[in-house]
């Protein structure tokens, strides 16, 4: 149901559900890949909901058959044009993370309700949410090609530990199920896919019985402990290593392959070993 009191967007949708507001990533034809429009609208919606008195809890979900396939690397955003240097690269990727920090710092609890595919940068979004509930058959995974330098998995360390984060990072296209994501601690728990929406609804409504100001301070207290343990300091690290590696020959070769052949064929060529550097790394 469309609520006239809620703003309308192009790439996301807001829907009231009593004290819960659903924030739906709404590019189903692109598996909700996050382009500049979606990210900008996500920030605008979060700002709106922070001041919205009817919203006590926010739940982020995806339209169609996926939560999100991650960043839209085939997009053609103006800021990705020629003439960028390594500092510009860092600023762009740190900016993406700062958008997600607004979820971490949001005055209201935010739940990620994950079904279908949740890949690459979409897993970052979930890490910043206060809770993550996954469908048991959801697919949680990382990019099929190493086009970055650890932008995503440093944020996993606080949830799953360094060894499992390395397992995901070091193997291209790593995938785990929703059940495994729950067992590892990446998600709070997993439920059958057909129960996901109702389960998150009931969770949010139960949380909403607590006065809003009390919820806000409870969230702040726990986040402060996590930040003292290093969470906030971890956030920019991936942007730093990513910016460095983007200027390496190996990554530039992969990006050229994507531009020349398209993403699917570039992945196929990578899996066949056609982009391997013949010089062994030290």
Image (spheres, helix red, strand yellow):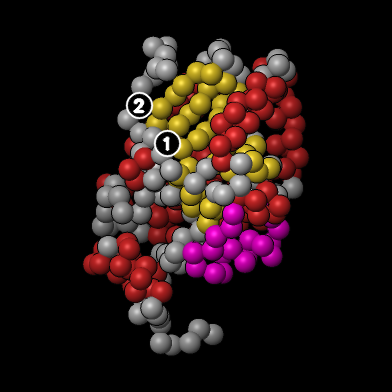
Mark 1: few/some/many CA within 10 Å (<14, 14-19, 20+): some
- C-alpha distance separating marks 1 and 2: 14 Å
Q: Residue 249: name its quadrant.
A: bottom left
Q: Which residues are magenta?
A: 158-177
198 versus 69 height, above or below: above
Residue closest to the eye, 176 or 122: 176
Q: Is residue 224 above or below residue 254?
A: above
The residue beneath circle 2 is 9
Number of marks in the rendered image: 2
> Label 1's element?
loop
Residue 33 visible, this angle: yes
Task: Kindly identify which residue carries mark 1.
Answer: 63
Percent x, y of residue 105:
60, 32
- In the rendered structure, the answer to whether residue 48 lies left or right of residue 157 reads left
Residue 236 visible (yes or no): no
Residue in view at x 32 percent, y 30 percent: 10
- Crowdedness near tag 2: few (<14), some (14–19) or many (≥20) residues, C-alpha within 10 Å: some
Q: Position of residue 80 (x, y in %)?
A: 31, 52
């Amino acid at each position: 149901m469309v609520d006239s009191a809620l703003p309308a967007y192009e790439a996301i949708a807001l829907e009231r559900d009593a004290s819960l507001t659903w924030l739906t990533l709404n590019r189903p034809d692109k598996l909700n890949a996050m382009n500049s429009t979606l990210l900008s609208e996500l920030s605008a919606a979060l700002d709106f909901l922070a001041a919205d008195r009817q919203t006590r809890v926010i739940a982020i979900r995806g339209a169609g058959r996926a939560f999100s396939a991650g960043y839209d690397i085939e997009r053609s955003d103006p800021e990705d044009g020629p003439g960028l240097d390594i500092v510009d690269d860092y600023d762009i990727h740190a900016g993406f993370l700062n958008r997600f920090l607004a979820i971490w710092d949001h005055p209201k609890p935010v739940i990620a309700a994950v079904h279908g595919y949740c890949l690459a940068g979409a897993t970052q979004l979930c890490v910043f949410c206060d809770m993550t509930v996954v469908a048991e058959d959801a697919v949680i995974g990382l990019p099929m090609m190493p086009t970055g330098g650890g932008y995503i998995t440093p944020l996993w360390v606080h949830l799953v530990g360094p060894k499992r984060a390395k397992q995901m990072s070091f193997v291209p296209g790593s995938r785990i199920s929703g059940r495994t994501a729950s067992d590892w601690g990446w998600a709070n728990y997993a439920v059958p896919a057909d129960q996901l929406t109702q389960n998150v609804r009931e969770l949010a409504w139960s949380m909403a019985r607590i006065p809003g100001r009390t919820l806000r301070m409870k969230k702040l207290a726990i986040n402060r402990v996590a930040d003292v343990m290093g969470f906030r300091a971890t956030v920019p690290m991936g942007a730093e290593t990513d910016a460095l590696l983007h200027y390496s020959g190996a990554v530039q070769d992969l990006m050229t392959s994507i531009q020349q052949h398209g993403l699917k064929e570039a992945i196929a060529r990578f899996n066949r070993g056609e982009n391997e550097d013949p010089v062994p790394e030290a």
